[in-house]
Image: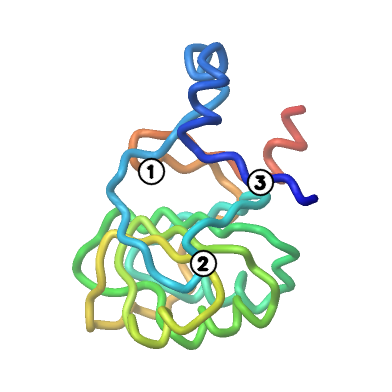
Amino acid sequence: MAALPLATAEACDANQHMISSGDLRALQPIFQIYGRRQVFSGPIVTLKVFEDNVLIREFLEERGNGRVLVVDGGASMRCAILGGNPVQQAQNNGWAGIIINGCIRDVDEINGCDIGVRALASHPMKAYKKGNGEKHVPVHIAGTRICDEKLMHQIG
């Protein structure tokens, strides 16, 4: 018999010492849920951009291998930095999910994909395509510092 997944609240309850030390953190509940996967997890890859989606698309063209892309988009509400085509590509490339500290567009298309997506909101305007941003850097989103899996291997 397969083990039942552990609910997030149960993980928090069972690990109070890790919460107190800061080793276990939960994002503030600011995100809307998109995509067909309501629950997802995986090794984290981080990206920091502002109103530019070139680097996001580049990441999602890679094999995901069950990873989660966490994008600090500066909480911009002026345009969407993720749309339906890259999410479809992420699904096809095996990404588990995408968290966007900013906006998405093509909501109906994204909601049809078997991938988890979290974002602040949807916005019809598309992002710039300059290629600016930082890969594999610590980001601060929803009250939590999030580190890239590559950075964690360097620290550990």
**Amino acid type indicated by mark 1:** Ile
N-term mark: 1 or 2: 2
Name above or below for residue 63 compared with residue 26: below
Q: Residue at x 39, y 39 (%)?
A: 27
Which of discs 1 and 2 lies nearer the camera? The answer is 2
Name above or below for residue 45 compared with residue 81: above
**Amino acid type indicated by mark 3:** Leu
**Which residue bears the numbered disc 2?**
37
- For the residue carrying disc 3, how many other residues have a C-alpha within 10 Å: few (<14), some (14-19), or many (20+)? few
Give the number of the disc on residue 155: none
**Amino acid type indicated by mark 2:** Arg
Q: Give the structural element (helix, strand or loop) at label 3.
A: loop
Q: Give the structural element (helix, strand or loop) at label 2.
A: loop
**Which residue bears the numbered disc 1?**
141
- Quarter occupied by residue 69: bottom right
Residue 113 versus residue 90: which sits nearer the camera? Answer: 113
Name above or below for residue 71 compared with residue 117: above
* Residue 118 point in image, percent of width and height: 40, 61
Q: Which residue, as the protein is rendered here, is positioned at the far left?
A: 78
- For the residue carrying disc 1, how many other residues have a C-alpha within 10 Å: few (<14), some (14-19), or many (20+)? many
Residue 66 versus residue 114: which sits nearer the camera? Answer: 114
**Which residue bears the numbered disc 3?**
4
Quadrant showing the C terminus: top right
Disc 1 + disc 2, Cβ < 8 Å: no
